[in-house]
Amino acid sequence: MTEAPTPYELDADTMTGGMRPIRQAVLSIGSNLGDRAGRLQGAVSALEDTPEVTVVAISSVYETEPVGAPEGSGPFLNAVVLIDTTLTVHTLLDRALAIEDAFERERSEPGAPRTLDVDIIVVGDRVAHDDSLTLPHPRAHERAFVLVPWLEIDPEGEIPGHGFVADLVSGVDASGVTKREDVEIFL
């Protein structure tokens, strides 16, 4: 087998002999109900157990004030997870929703407190917009709780159509994003 110019471009599908692209994806995870740190760890463990997904990096955990949440909502713990995957974007979305469901995520009003939120931010340079998924995530470029942890693990990160994370983070208010040295997520 001939190696691709970069090892992240193609992956041999041993069942069919076909080639499927390996894409790097960025996921944002967050929780503001119950055992917040335990739920983030559970999300990462579930991603690790997903066929065709390799967890490449996990940011530090950050505590953030809820954005657009009802009054009285508690602070979130947030992190960003960098993965390599050969899953289609819709299969990855299905997996993210299944992980949320496993942690009893209730989908009610936007911004409502949640046990677990798993958002797909980018998948490679893929741009998509349909009834179930918009890529890149439509508000990621405005959210410090996504940009700050992402910059930590991927200084070259980029949101298609918006620019480099390093540039975007300087344009958002990150004062409400606090690194939690006492909370760690493990691979």
Image (spheres, rainbow, N blue to C red):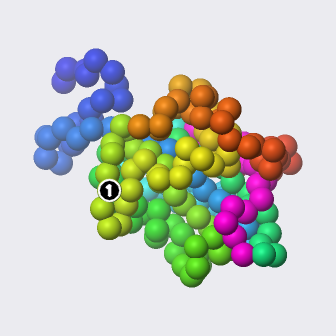
- Left or right: residue 143 versus residue 179 is left
Residue 49 seen anywhere in this rendered image of the structure: yes
Q: Nearer the viewer, residue 119 or 40?
A: 119
Rendering coords of residue 106 (x, y %): 58, 80
Rendering coords of residue 171 (x, y %): 66, 36
Q: Nearer the viewer, residue 162 or 5?
A: 162
* Position above or below: 118 against 108: above
Q: Residue at x 54, y 60 (%)?
A: 118
Quarter of the N terminus within the rendering = top left
Rendering coords of residue 168 (x, y %): 60, 35
Q: Residue at x 18, y 38 (%)?
A: 19
Q: Residue furthest right?
A: 182
Q: Residue at x 76, y 55 (%)?
A: 64
Q: Residue furthest top?
A: 5
Q: Main secondary structure of the magenta part?
A: loop
Q: Residue at x 69, y 61 (%)?
A: 67
Is 123 a magenta residue?
A: no
Q: What span is in magenta?
A: 57-70
The type of residue carrying mark 1 is: His
User: How many C-alpha atoms fall within 10 Å of the one at disc 1: few (<14), some, or many (≥20)?
Assistant: few
Q: Disc 1 on helix, strand or loop?
A: strand
Quadrant in the picture for residue 155: top right
Residue behind mark 1: 129
Rendering coords of residue 127 (x, y %): 33, 45
